Image: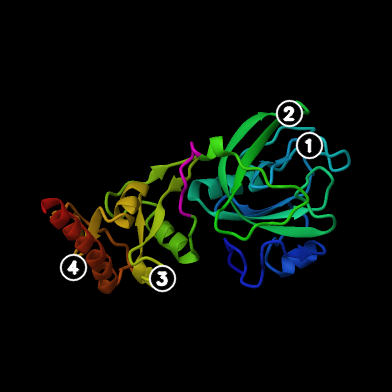
Amino acid sequence: MTRFFGTPADVHVGQQFIDRRELHDAYVHRPLQAGISGTAAEGADSIVVSGGYIDDQDNGDYILYTGHGGNDRGTRRQIADQSPTATGNAALITSMVNGFPVRVVRGAHKKSAYAPLAGYQYAGLFTVSNYLTHPGRDGFLIIQFRLDRLAEQPPLVTRGPAESDPAFATTTVSRRVRDSALSREIKAQYGHSCQVCGTAVPASGDRLYAEGAHVRPLGRPHLGSDSILNILCLCPNHHTQLDFGGMVILDDMSVAPTKTLKPFAELTWRRGHRIDAENAAYHRALWVQAVQESLETSAA
């Protein structure tokens, strides 16, 4: 099965699982032993928080999660430095760079009021906000990731009220996490270079960042499709400009500011990829009309 970023269709927040095998069979967390599921190339799709690292801090709605490596299984103490290039840690960094959602599962342990009393519990989707390399309580370097629970999910009933961190929330920028397999395929096809300006945003290590942009918005009332005929590979600036109506796509597949409709660039294409002209026309009509109404109101 292709690595899946999101909540499986038949799984709900708060669902209990007896053991790792049940988690595996439900596609919630596939590894039977590792706490991080993922690779440096693909990103991390799920983690298990089970109190195995002394530096972990579970605050309910946000988690300071210690990456893997250098941990003695018997004593659960750190006996060696961790590396950001280790598979699980590199996977979480890739998810952070690309804004992929991560499924979080909590295992039973006494350190957290948010952990189940027995077995495992699905806590929902979190985003990797940032990470820090610093000495842990045992004196060795650890890779510590901050994961924040995404909004618009059912609340999780726990033994203690979840804590939020408003000071942190006001200083971070929320990013879109909707990133389908098709979107990742399109970004890879363009080498993460924007189809408008050609920019590939450098990120950690050799990673490049781009965003999969749906031309006709998904969901009601627009009902755009998650298909290659509706997805562009864009840099964050041009994705935002497209989403917020600052630019539109003309019939000849050039792009123009919505106010003037005078082209400033042409979309670049790779073999086998085009968007449907009807999707571009829908997006254009949506925003051109709004701009015209705004100008008419201002003139009056």
Report which residue position mark 4 lands on. Answer: 251
Q: For mark 4, does the 10 Å Cα neighbourhood hold few (<14), some (14 to 19), or many (20 or more) residues?
A: few
Could one spot residue 261 in this view of the protein?
Answer: no
Circles 3, 4 touching at the beta carbon (< 8 Å): no
Query: Is residue 299 placed above or below 63 in the rendered structure?
Result: below
Q: Whole-Å distance between the Cαs marked 4 and 1?
A: 58 Å
Q: Is residue 154 magenta?
A: no
Magenta-tinted stretch:
170-176
Circles 4, 1 touching at the beta carbon (< 8 Å): no
Q: Position of residue 86 (x, y in %)?
A: 65, 43
Q: Whole-Å distance between the Cαs marked 2 and 1?
A: 12 Å
Q: Of marks 3 and 4, which one's residue comes earlier in the chain? A: 3
Q: Amino acid at mark 1?
A: Ile
Report which residue position mark 3 lands on. Answer: 220
Q: Position of residue 150 (x, y in %)?
A: 56, 53
Q: For the point 44% across and 46% down, which residue is it?
A: 208
Q: For the point 38% across and 71% down, which residue is it?
A: 221
Report which residue position mark 1 lands on. Answer: 54
Q: Of marks 2 and 1, which one's residue comes earlier in the chain? A: 1
Q: Whole-Å distance between the Cαs marked 2 and 4?
A: 58 Å
Query: Is residue 83 placed above or below 200 in the rendered structure?
Result: above
Q: For the point 34% across and 51% down, which residue is it?
A: 240
The numbered disc on residue 140 is 2
Q: For mark 1, does the 10 Å Cα neighbourhood hold few (<14), some (14 to 19), or many (20 or more) residues?
A: some
Q: Quadrant of residue 268?
A: bottom left
Q: Of marks 2 and 4, which one's residue comes earlier in the chain? A: 2
Dot 3: element: loop
